[in-house]
Every structure is written in C-alpha cells, then in structure tokens.
Amino acid sequence: MTSTQQNNSKGKKLDGVKYLLALNQENSRIFQDPGTALERRKYREQHPTEIAVLKCMDGRLNLPVMTNTALGIIQPWRNLGGRFDLGWPLFALTMKDWVDYAINRGRDCLVIITYHYAKGDVHRGCRGFNYDVDAARAFTAELNKQFDSVFGKKVVYTIRCGIETDLDTLILHGEGGEVLDVSSISDHSSENVVEILRKMYPQMPFAILKDLLPLIQGNIEHIAEIKDAKRPITDAEHKEWVLAVGRGFDWLHEINTTLIVGPYDPDLAGAIRTAAGILRTNLEEKRITEEKGIVLMTSAPYRDPAGPEPHLAAEKAKFLNRFSFEIIKKDVPELLPYLQRLTMRVDMNTRQAEVLEQD
Ligand SMILES: [Zn+2]
C-alpha cells in the first residue's frame, strides 16, 4: 500500500478506520453492558419473535434507529435495491438457517421486505431501482409472494414496508393491498395500533403482531423526534463514506455512514460497483469530509468461537476485501487516493470486531 492511499489530497492522515474501530469498541461495550444485556433479555422474553429486515444497501436505512429498537433485535439482510430471490443459493441458505434457529427455540419469524424513497425529491430515492418507486413496490410484492409460497404464513409471516427517508417514516402494506403511512397514526396507544395492525394483517398470528407493535410505536416516536429536531434535508442526502461488504455490521448503529452490500447476490460485483459509484458521487459532490476518507470494510460474523467457524469467517472477510478492491481498482479508481482497507471478523456474542488486516 503506498502512502498516498493513507493520506487525503492535502496530505493529512485519513482517520476513517480509527473512527470505525472506536465506534465498534463503544457499541460492543454497550452491547455487553450487563444492564443492556438484561434489558435485551427481558425484551426478548416479552417479544420473542425473530425479526428479519431485507433492505437496500443504502446507508440511510437503519431500522433499529428508525424504530428506536435496541441493537441485536432486528436482523438485517442487505443488497442493492433490497433485491433478493429465494433462488439465490447463499440467500436461501441463510434464510433457512435463520428460520431453523427460530423454530429450534420455539420462536415465530417476521420478515419485513422493504423498499425506499424520499417524498421531497425522486433523486433522493433508490438508485438500485433507478429511482422508480413503482418498480421497487412491484418487486417487493413478488418477493412477498415467493416467501409465502416457501414458508407459508403461520410460523413465518412476511410483510412489505416502504421507508420514506426524508422523515424516516415506515409505510405499511396490508394483506389486501391497503397502504398506511405510520406518521398518520395520531393515537399511538397499544390498543389503537393493535387494532390497526389486525385490520391490515388479518392472517398474522397474534404472537407476531404484538412483537411488530413496539417497532411501529418506536417509529412514531422517532418521526416526532426528527420533526422536533427539524433535521435539515441535506442530512437526508447520501453522505456515506464507508463501503462495507459481507455480514456482521449491525454494531454500526449510525445512519448515513455506510453502504452495506451482503454477499448474497449472484452479481456481487455489480452491487459493489454500484455502491462504489455512489461513494464517488458523494466525493464529487463534496458531501463527505476528506479527513475520514473512504473505507472499504469487509467482515464475516461467527457465533461459535471453537472449531473452524472463526477461521472460515477470517477467510471470507479476506476474500471479500481482495474481491471488492479489484473491482474498485478497475471500475471506480477515483476512490483510490482516499481509500483505506479494513478486514475484520465479528464475534456475534459480543459484537466485538477483530482486525485481520488494515492499512
Ligand atoms: Zn436503495
């Protein structure tokens, strides 16, 4: 690695990697804090449903933040545009593992399929769908059908949900095609929201519905906070400076920082190229600071610290870093003067990242 890759154009040291490692330390510490751990355990006992969210790589889409939900409750799956297909071998395998994990613990599963847009400007919407919200909605409808045909609606229940990023509002799509903007719910008492959800999702088991409830109430609170803070619209524009490839990034509890590409898409190279292109635009439009630079961060998670799992995680993370770097070098070389590389594996018991390679 040459020294030009570690300094910005003014010759200052880039500090993006340092920032990310400090953030991981802090969020891992919070995750392991006995008080937080007990709180999470209590929450899981009251709300045992396993929740998966399928979403776009877009760094503005942070469901835990948008629903005021603690780290470790919502499991994210990320890809360009939020596009997935149960025919993709790795995606099918991870979904099956996740459902098996839940069933072995006697838990239900809620899958939330999302698309996103911005009400103020079509170009703040989803590049993965060329800003075409109707196309994104149609895609989620088909994916919902695919999930229903594979998993049914009894133990695994799948819903569609839009995310409006100017106000971080969830837009629920009901079984009968009805659409509800969560910000329009004026009475957010449990009784009222349960009533609304029952009408929208008549087939949803009540055990799942009552675990969806706090997410909706959390979103109503979050929208009120965004409105109170009068968040400037520039904060709703792309500002990401990290390209994360792999899995195990849920400690990154920060909005508009990272484009996350999961490893599921058979056209992984295309997804990485698009993400790198968004970072290039962010640089050109001067929406990111030169001090942090741009970080290519790859990660793989593991749960069982004994045996081959952590070693496999290390090999995956290293491969993904080399693979992504080659694509950037060939197709988006404008990033190279700002680029730092970070390769890590993450212990999912602690959310602690271990650095395998960095520059
Ligand atoms: Zn998107």
Image (cartoon, rainbow, N blue to C red):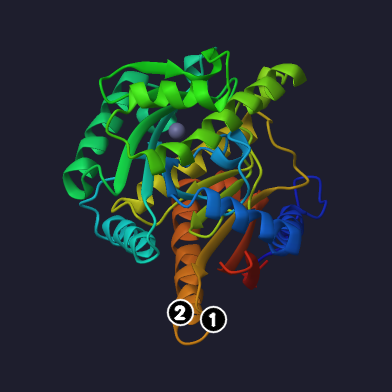
Q: Nearer the viewer, residue 295 or 25?
A: 25
Instruction: Residue 137: give x, y in percent of width and height.
Output: 32, 25
User: Who's the residue at 56% across and 33% down the image?
Assistant: 281
The local secondary structure at tag 1 comes to: loop
Ligand 1 is found in which quarter of the picture? top left
Q: Which residue is mark 1?
A: 305
Q: Residue furthest bottom?
A: 307
Q: Nearer the viewer, residue 168 or 108?
A: 108
In three-dimensional space, the C-alpha distance between marks 2 and 1, rounded to whole angstroms, equals: 7 Å
Dot 2 and dot 1 residues touching (CB under 8 Å): yes
The amino acid beneath tag 1 is Pro
In the rendered image, residue 141, in percent from the top left (x then y), is placed at: 26, 30
Q: Is the CB of mark 2 within 8 Å of ligand 1?
A: no
Q: Is residue 162 above or below residue 339?
A: above
The quarter holding residue 297 reads bottom right
Q: Which residue is mark 2?
A: 309
Rendered residue at 44%/78% (across/down): 312
Q: Amino acid at mark 2?
A: Glu
Residue drawn at point x = 52 percent, y = 36 percent: 278
Q: Residue at x 43, y 40 (%)?
A: 55
Q: Is residue 256 left or right of residue 269?
A: right
Side of 224 relative to 188 (left or right):
right
State left or right for residue 143 relative to residue 294: left
- Percent across and percent down for residue 199 are 34, 21
Q: Secondary structure at mark 2?
A: helix
